[in-house]
Image: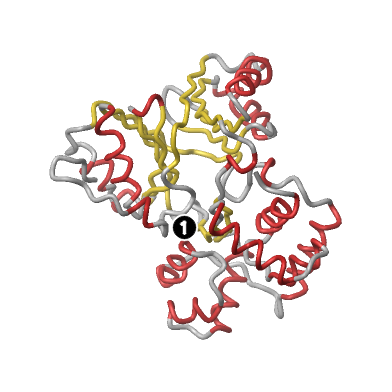
Amino acid sequence: MLDDLDRALIHALHIDGRAPFNRIATALDVSPQTVARRYRRLRGEAPLRVVGLPDPDRAGRTQWLLRLTAAAGSAQDLAHALVRRRDTSWVKLTSGGTEVVAIIHTPTAAEAGNSLLLRDIPRTSAITAVSAHCVLHTYLGGPTYWRRSADTLDEDQQRLLREQQAAETSYAPVPRQLTEGDGDLLLTLQKDGRASHAELARATGWSPATVARRLADLRAGGAVFYDVEVDAGHFGAHTRALLWMSVPPAQLENVATTLAGHDELAYVAATTGPTNLVAQALCRDPADLHHYLARRLGSLDAVHRMESSPILRSLKAASPVVTDPARARRPPAPDRARL
């Protein structure tokens, strides 16, 4: 479990993932050395990682929620194959270890095609069932973080972080969109959203000043945001489930907005398919999940049908780039799945 200072630091990183340690220290009323030391410890033990990610709409990308069913002996190999791909995120083993759920990132342009959905999955014999749900709108998730991971700082501390961020920008950013020329910048941010301007300059071939301006412009335009990857178990959420719901279209907006305000949920999105609303619940234990499903979610009459899939293991988080060798190292044997 995290102590109050750990939680405050994580909350600060949710507000500004690239905030310098001295700025965070001012808001938390501790020394910059203490913040740096805590950050390094959380990186190693939580493990915590700040990542810079593109907004899908502004990057011309579409997200698909993929559900793959396989025999128990094959599901883990499928999951590890998906983890190694650069077009996937949020890879999870669910439903007794026979189902793999992942988000697939594809070009929105029709002519770009989709090798994973159209070619690689149909060729994988270990898969016994497939369903793909196009994510139409995200109500909670992405730039909007799970409330229970960001509930420590008071209003004055949050305002101070935001005011300091604005004051430290030496010019007025011009909102920009991502282009193909931002590929190296984005790849580096997906590995480490707190990479220094010097590190980003080496990766892109730009000057540090150009990097700083480009980051400010992309952030001002909402093209890039920063997410904090950390195991929800450190916040006491040990029981996790995906909730697949069917809601009449006329009531979808109201139900999704209501769910996005529930502290038990970390993700809410409208999708295509027979279940048109999906959510991720993070609860203390099975009894807490039951209480949420029976009382809070159960009170919504517009939810006509709901399927819950327990999450057994999360193998990949928000970033498509895995930097933990233990998650990406597992090489497939000759009879294992490749995607």
> Badge 1: how crowded within 10 Å, few (<14), some, or many (20+)?
some
- Amino acid tagged 1: Ala
Q: Quadrant of the N terminus?
A: top right
Residue 68, position as x, y percentages in the image: 32, 32
Q: Is residue 314 left or right of residue 121?
A: right
The residue most toward the right is 156
Q: Quadrant of residue 248?
A: top right
Q: Residue at x 64, y 65 (%)?
A: 220
Identify whether 217 is placed above or below 256.
below
Q: Nearer the viewer, residue 75 or 105?
A: 75
Identify whether 293 is placed above or below 196.
above
Q: Quadrant of the C terminus?
A: top left
Query: What residue is disc 1 on?
Result: 59
Identify whether 31 is placed above or below 298.
below
Label 1 sits on a secondary structure element that is: loop
Q: Residue at x 57, y 31 (%)?
A: 281
Q: Residue at x 76, y 62 (%)?
A: 162
Residue 195, position as x, y percentages in the image: 53, 71
Q: Quadrant of residue 217?
A: bottom right
